[in-house]
Image (tube, helix red, strand yellow):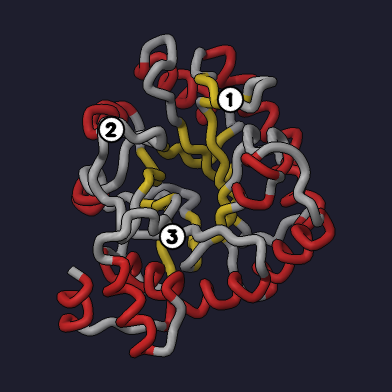
């Protein structure tokens, strides 16, 4: 496996080859991830530009918008190329007040999968990440069992996890062939903060993914809200003549061959920069400097 390609569902009859980095669509929605983008034509142009530049992994969800990013992907890229991978997720929904709510009961998961299929104009979803909010009712194993049933019915090709704890990962790996895990992880935020509104972070999960050879997909990978250490990023980025965002992506790619970054942006210029980050090489000394 090269630093620019990762295999999702290795060992199965239908593995997927994702090129690094992928693209996360969440930011293409309106303010507070709600409603249509201000420039819908621009969003479609960005998605088409990403595909033209070789991006073949797009992350979405039916609760982005809600329903916005799925429809943007379909309008921009349908009919899909044979190597295109659209990864969606289930386990949450948006309330009328724009809140984020759990949606993880068996019947709810089925509705969400059907909704994703309809919005994306697909007969089978290539990859679905199953996640449940901390206050979600029901049992994790029951929800995961529903996802396994949907996979057996042919509505899902590969099944992954989102916002998974160590215990949930260990439970899931005993029940099904987990294709990937999507958790929050970045240079600045690696270990779970119990008070975080974003769920479980990847520092605890990444070693398990490596052990089981499961691709790890970090979201909010360009998160740089904590001040400590950011000056090092800025300093090294200036020396190397790259942007801080590019250096963040390069840092991720150097942490593990099993990492698939999915940085999101609404700017074609930044999209092009993010893709070029896969070509940035970091020496041991530079990685030690970043800490």
Decide: few, some or many residues near mark 3? Use Cα within 10 Å; few <14, some 14-19, many ≥20.
many
For residue 133, which numbered disc appears in the image? none
For residue 99, which numbered disc appears in the image? 1
Residue 28 image point, x, y percent: 67, 52
Residue for badge 2: 165
Mark closer to the chain start, 1 or 3: 1
Residue for badge 3: 222
Circles 2, 1 touching at the beta carbon (< 8 Å): no
- In whole angstroms, how far apart are the C-alphas of marks 2 and 3? 21 Å
Q: Quadrant of the C terminus?
A: bottom left
Q: Secondary structure at mark 3?
A: loop
Q: Quadrant of the N terminus?
A: bottom left
In-front residue for pair 146/230: 230
Label tally: 3
- In whole angstroms, how far apart are the C-alphas of marks 1 and 3? 23 Å
Q: In the figure, 96 relative to 196: above or below?
A: above
Mark closer to the chain start, 2 or 3: 2
Q: Nearer the viewer, mark 2 or mark 1?
A: 1
| Residue at 50% over, 80% down | 276
Asked if residue 38 lies left or right of residue 273, the reply is right
Q: Secondary structure at mark 2?
A: loop
Circles 2, 3 touching at the beta carbon (< 8 Å): no
Q: Secondary structure at mark 1?
A: loop
Residue 77 image point, x, y percent: 76, 58
Decide: few, some or many residues near mark 1? Use Cα within 10 Å; few <14, some 14-19, many ≥20.
few
Asked if residue 20 lies left or right of residue 88, the reply is left
| Residue at 27% over, 74% down | 232
Mark closer to the chain start, 2 or 1: 1
Residue 176 image point, x, y percent: 35, 31
């Amino acid at each position: 496996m090269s630093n620019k390609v990762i295999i999702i569902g290795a060992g199965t009859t239908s593995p997927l080859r994702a090129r690094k980095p992928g693209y996360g669509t969440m930011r293409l929605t309106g303010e507070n991830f709600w409603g249509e983008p201000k420039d819908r034509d621009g969003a479609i142009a960005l998605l088409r530009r990403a595909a033209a530049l070789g991006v073949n992994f797009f992350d979405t969800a039916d609760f982005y918008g809600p329903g916005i990013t799925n429809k943007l992907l379909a309008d921009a890229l349908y009919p899909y190329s044979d190597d295109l991978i659209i990864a969606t997720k289930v386990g949450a929904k948006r309330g009328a007040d724009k809140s984020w709510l759990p949606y993880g009961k068996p019947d709810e998961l089925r509705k969400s999968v059907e909704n994703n299929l309809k919005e994306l104009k697909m007969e089978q979803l290539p990859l679905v990440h199953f996640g449940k909010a901390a206050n979600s009712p029901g049992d994790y194993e029951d929800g995961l069992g529903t996802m396994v049933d949907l996979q057996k019915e042919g509505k899902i090709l590969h099944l992954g996890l989102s916002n998974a704890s160590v215990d949930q990962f260990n439970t899931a790996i005993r029940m099904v062939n987990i294709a990937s895990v999507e958790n929050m992880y970045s240079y600045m935020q690696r270990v779970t903060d119990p008070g975080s509104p974003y769920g479980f972070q990847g520092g605890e999960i990444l070693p398990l993914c490596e052990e089981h050879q499961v691709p790890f997909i970090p979201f909010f990978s360009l998160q740089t809200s904590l001040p400590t250490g950011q000056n090092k990023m800025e300093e090294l980025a200036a020396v190397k003549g790259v942007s801080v965002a590019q250096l963040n992506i390069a840092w991720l790619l150097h942490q593990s061959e099993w990492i698939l970054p999915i940085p999101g942006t609404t700017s074609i210029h930044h999209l092009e920069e993010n893709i070029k980050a896969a070509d940035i090489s970091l020496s041991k000394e530079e990685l030690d400097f970043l800490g």
